[in-house]
Image: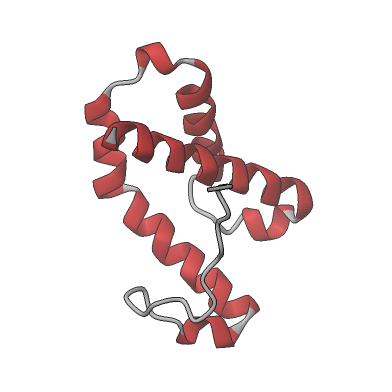
Amino acid sequence: MTQDAVERNFDRIGEAVNRLNGHNPSLAGKIPEMVKIINFRNFLTHEYDDVDPLIVWSHVQNKFPVLHATIRSLIAELDPEQDQIKDNEPDPNPPSFDLGT
């Protein structure tokens, strides 16, 4: 279950980077290994039967921290107030999920 969640989040990240590239290529170009991120997303989505969990976990440990820092830096450039939100602080306006229950 954890593996599926991690892969799903990499899928979302890759899709977001791909869409950003379509809307603002110069901003997306500031993301290191942008093309590799998109290709990894495509691999996870379309070649799921060939996914090696050790490679995915390696990306969690080695690639994601760099990407996370880069994204936070870009957000701070675009909206300096966002930089004030710390990772461990609760979101003051959390999303509401209505699951129909």
Horizontal and vertical percent position of residue 37: 49, 40
- Residue 38 in the image: x percent, y percent? 55, 36
Can you name the residue that lies furthest to the front here? 101
As drawn, the residue found furthest toward the top would be: 49
- Is residue 94 toward the left or the right of residue 78 in the image? left
Residue 85 falls in which quadrant of the image?
A: bottom left
Image point (51%, 46%), residue name: 13
Scheme by which the image is coloured: secondary structure
The relative height of residue 19 versus residue 77 in the rendered view (above or below) is: above
Q: In which quarter of the image is residue 89?
A: bottom left
Q: Is residue 67 left or right of residue 25?
A: left
Quadrant housing residue 2? top left
**Does 1 sit left or right of 23 as displayed?**
left
Residue at left 51%, top 32%? 41
* Residue 73 sits above or below residue 5 on the image: below
As drawn, the residue found furthest toward the right would be: 23
Residue 93, how many percent across, how many down? Answer: 54, 77
Q: Residue at x 75, y 56 (%)?
A: 24
* x, y percent for residue 16: 61, 47
- Total tally of numbered discs in the picture: 0
Q: Is residue 31 placed above or below 9 in the rendered structure?
A: below
Q: In which quarter of the image is the N terminus?
A: top left
Residue positioned 58% across, 86% down in the render = 80
